[in-house]
Each structure stands twice: as structure tokens, then as C-alpha cells.
Image (cartoon, helix red, strand yellow):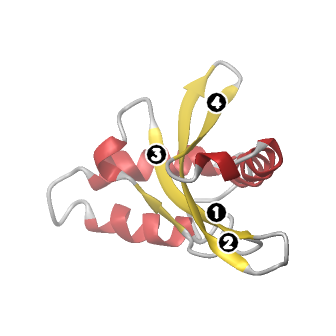
């Protein structure tokens, strides 16, 4: 099963009433560690539960930007939106602030690392 499919399964399960949702919430915490971390994406990634729907998964993340001198220059927050498609899934990266710094290179990098992570094979037994 692909990682994005596991997220979809457990996000749906997390909306059950307690105690039936606890297993799903615990598994989601574990699955978040399979998403990109480091190399600029240093604050990790969270699930935007209120924005997730039956046909959409939304993650919040941020990229730690360096200036031209190599010093940290703040964060660019963005959303990662995953929707199902006939070929697997579609991915959209939406910067929230400091959009002028979110150039094509950064967009492509963030897109690629999230695409490869979400498209990777994962087991629900782990």
C-alpha cells in the first residue's frame, strides 16, 4: 500500500468516536515520521485535520530559508494538498507566506520530496 493511501485510511478512522479512533491517531503520529524531514524542512509536517475531506488530504509544513550569505532568513509555510486521481494521486504545494521567496526551484524541491515520500510503499503492520 502507498503511504498516501495509509494516511487516507487512518485520517478517515481518526474521525470515529473515542476509543475507536485512538489506534488511527497513534498510527498517524507514526506515519508523519515517514514524510520529509531535514534539508530545509526542519519543523516537520502536521496534518490539517479540519481541511481533510473524503477526497483530500492536507498537510502543513515549512521550509527554513537561507539568505544569499548562508544565514537563516525565516520560514516559508506551505500546504501540501493530496487528491486522488486515476493515475494515483495529484499533489499541490501552496505557499502561505513569503510567496516571493517560494520560487520555482524551491517549489520543485518540495514537490519532489513529498511526491517520493507519499508514493513510497508502506506497510500498515509497522
Residue drawn at the location 45% of the way across and 34% of the way down = 56
Badges 1 and 2: C-beta atoms under 8 Å apart? yes
Is residue 1 visible to the viewer in this orientation of the structure? no
SS class, disc 2: loop
Residue drawn at the location 71% of the way across and 23% of the way down = 87
Query: Is residue 88 placed above or below 6 in the rendered structure?
Result: above
Sequence order check, earlier mark of 4 and 3: 3
SS class, disc 3: strand
Residue topped by disc 4: 90
Determine the CA span between mark 4 and mark 2: 21 Å
Q: Nearer the viewer, mark 1 or mark 2?
A: 2
Query: Is residue 106 placed above or below 20 in the rendered structure?
Result: above
SS class, disc 1: loop
Residue topped by disc 3: 58
Q: Which of the 4 image quarters holds residue 84? A: top right
Is residue 101 visible to the viewer in this orientation of the structure? yes
Q: Nearer the viewer, residue 124 or 76?
A: 76
Residue topped by disc 2: 37
Residue 44 vs residue 8: left or right?
Answer: right
Mark number displayed over residue 35: 1
Badges 1 and 4: C-beta atoms under 8 Å apart? no
Amino acid at each position: 500500500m502507498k503511504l498516501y493511501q495509509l494516511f487516507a485510511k487512518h485520517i478517515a478512522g481518526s474521525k470515529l468516536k473515542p476509543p475507536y479512533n485512538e489506534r488511527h491517531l497513534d498510527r498517524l503520529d507514526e506515519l508523519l515520521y515517514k514524510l520529509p524531514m531535514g534539508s530545509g524542512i526542519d519543523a516537520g509536517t502536521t496534518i490539517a485535520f479540519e481541511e481533510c475531506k473524503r477526497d483530500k488530504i492536507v498537510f502543513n509544513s515549512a521550509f527554513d530559508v537561507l539568505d544569499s550569505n548562508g544565514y537563516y532568513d525565516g520560514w516559508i509555510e506551505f500546504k501540501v494538498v493530496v487528491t486522488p486521481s486515476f493515475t494515483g494521486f495529484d499533489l499541490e504545494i501552496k505557499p502561505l507566506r513569503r510567496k516571493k521567496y517560494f520560487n520555482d526551484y524551491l517549489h520543485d524541491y518540495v514537490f519532489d520530496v513529498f511526491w517520493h515520500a507519499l508514493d513510497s510503499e508502506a506497510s500498515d503492520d509497522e
